[in-house]
Amino acid sequence: MKIDPQLLEFAKSMRHTATDAEHFMWQLLRAKRFMNLKFRRQHVIKPYIVDFYCHEIGLVIELDGSQHGTDETKEYDAERTKFLEALGLTVVRYWNHDVLRRMDVVLEDLWQRCFELKSKITSP
């Protein structure tokens, strides 16, 4: 399935305008630094662009700022999560302020989720 070139270009531009939280998280995930897993950032899963994606374990990581607290955005995020989960993906969300101020808690949760997903893949 061919991906819309405009969507790819938008994803690329988003990599250059990352939030502080996205930049910080990317420094921890890039180059297989976290659990030896390969993550992509601003990855297109048509029709969406997800913040971080690990194909190996089917994990999507979304970092949410305060704009995700509105009823309208919560509804959109829920629909988006439902769509991604229907593809067999696991979606985890972290608040930007937690990434920036409580990274130890975020990484502990992320490690647990990745461990569980890796275990499902490797178990017979």
Image (cartoon, helix red, strand yellow):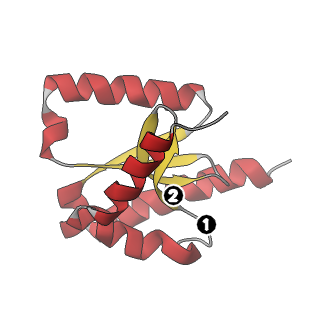
One can see residue 81 in this view: yes
Q: Give the image quarter of residue 38.
A: bottom right
Tell me if 2 is positioned left or right of 40 in this view: right
User: Residue 37, labelled with which disc?
Assistant: 1
User: Above or below — where is 59 with respect to 78?
Assistant: below
Tell me if 27 is positioned left or right of 74 in this view: right
User: Above or below — where is 122 with respect to 108?
Assistant: above
Which corner quadrant holds the N terminus?
top right
One can see residue 33 in this view: no
Q: Residue at x 17, y 59 (%)?
A: 97
Q: Earlier in the sequence, mark 1 or mark 2?
A: 1
Callout 1 amino acid: Leu
Q: Which residue is mark 2?
A: 112
Q: Give the image quarter of residue 108.
A: bottom left
Q: Residue at x 32, y 30 (%)?
A: 77
Callout 2 amino acid: Gln
